[in-house]
Image (cartoon, rainbow, N blue to C red):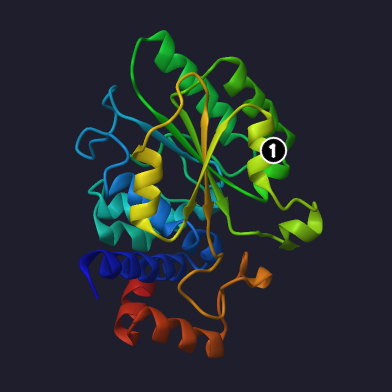
């Protein structure tokens, strides 16, 4: 296994251990976006500095689907924003890491999210502010395909085009699932590309579990004067067989039988599981 594959597997392993430490977590939603956030922070899509997280010249990343925060927390830790051991305080009294990201608590978090549909509007504001300040910051917003049922998303999409925000990048996590089932069954939407194009956005697609493809598409050539969207085709629950493409895992921790499968597939030992649970 190469270094990147090893790092990605460790992130998924730590996502699960982080959830175990707090006793809660949107595991499948976090697993679907691991490669995306890894490409942003670790492979260099984002211009950022973990030692100076408030540097004005940094790019901004907003996790609009805030319930996927376990992936963000673990990548921020890997990127040097805080020590790995702090992950085991997740959702405990006094922790800086709650069930959704809080901009006032944790370095590297750019917006408090969790109430779905708000992240892109925040991103529009940040992109406008960067332009007003004559800064060349890029603003990246990760949204879920289920989240795109929120009307506020499309108000922000219209505004992004109206203002010609070519420093605004949406990454759409197209895992085809939401809390209660498949997106195509609930809202009968099967093609996001045509919808974003109808609002004037430039659209690219990528394999959302291929870091090199994500990096290539985001850092490649884009059309000036229009906002951009990368549709990342992903698998919800990626990396754990019983979670993949299974709607019931949107908000669930495994039972004893399922736990054995998760531990085996993620390479988790009994000692590691007990350590994260008893950490104070």
Q: Is residue 61 left or right of residue 114?
A: left
- Residue 212 percent coordinates (x, y): 33, 54
Q: Residue at x 35, y 63 (%)?
A: 88
User: Would residue 94 be seen by someone viewing this image from the given angle?
Assistant: no
- Screen quadrant of the N terminus: bottom left
Q: Residue at x 40, y 87 (%)?
A: 264
Which residue is more in the foreground, 24 or 199?
199
Which residue is more in the foreground, 158 or 29?
158
- Residue 116 percent coordinates (x, y): 64, 42
Q: In this view, does 196 lie above or below 13?
A: above
User: Would residue 252 be seen by someone viewing this image from the given angle?
Assistant: yes
| Residue linked to disc 1 | 195
- Screen quadrant of the C terminus: bottom left
Q: Is residue 215 left or right of residue 261?
A: left
Q: How crowded is mark 1: few (under 14 residues within 10 Å), some or many (20 or more)?
A: few
- Residue 76 percent coordinates (x, y): 32, 49
Q: Is residue 37 above or below residue 135?
A: below
Q: What element carries label 1?
A: helix
Figure quadrant of residue 108: top left
Q: How many numbered marks are there?
A: 1
Q: Which residue is drawn at 34% across and 50% down?
A: 39
- Residue 168 percent coordinates (x, y): 48, 28
Q: Residue at x 35, y 24 (%)?
A: 137
Q: Is residue 130 above or below residue 101?
A: above
């Amino acid at each position: 296994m190469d270094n990147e594959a090893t790092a990605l597997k460790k992130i998924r392993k730590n996502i699960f251990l982080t959830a175990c430490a707090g006793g809660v977590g949107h595991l499948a939603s976090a697993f679907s976006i691991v490669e995306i956030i890894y490409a942003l922070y670790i492979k260099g899509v984002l211009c950022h500095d973990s030692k100076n997280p408030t540097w004005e010249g940094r790019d901004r990343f907003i996790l609009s689907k805030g319930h996927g925060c376990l992936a963000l927390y673990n990548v921020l830790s890997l990127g040097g924003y805080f020590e790995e051991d702090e992950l085991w305080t997740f959702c405990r009294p006094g922790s800086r890491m709650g069930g959704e990201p809080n901009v006032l608590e944790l370095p590297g978090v750019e917006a408090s999210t969790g109430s779905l549909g708000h992240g892109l509007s925040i991103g529009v504001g940040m992109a406008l502010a960067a332009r007003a300040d004559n800064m060349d910051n890029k603003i990246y917003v990760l949204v879920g395909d289920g989240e795109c049922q929120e009307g506020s998303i499309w108000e922000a999409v219209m505004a992004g085009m109206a203002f010609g925000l070519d420093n605004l990048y949406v990454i759409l996590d197209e895992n085809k699932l939401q809390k209660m089932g498949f997106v195509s069954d609930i809202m009968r939407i099967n093609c996001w590309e045509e919808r974003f194009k109808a609002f004037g956005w430039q659209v690219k697609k990528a394999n959302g579990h291929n870091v090199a493809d994500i990096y290539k598409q985001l850092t490649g050539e884009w059309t000036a004067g229009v906002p951009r969207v990368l549709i990342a085709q992903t698998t919800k629950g990626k990396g754990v067989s019983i979670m993949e493409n299974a709607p019931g895992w949107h908000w669930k921790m495994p039972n004893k039988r399922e736990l054995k499968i998760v531990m085996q597939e993620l390479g988790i030992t009994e000692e590691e599981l007990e350590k994260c649970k008893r950490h104070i």
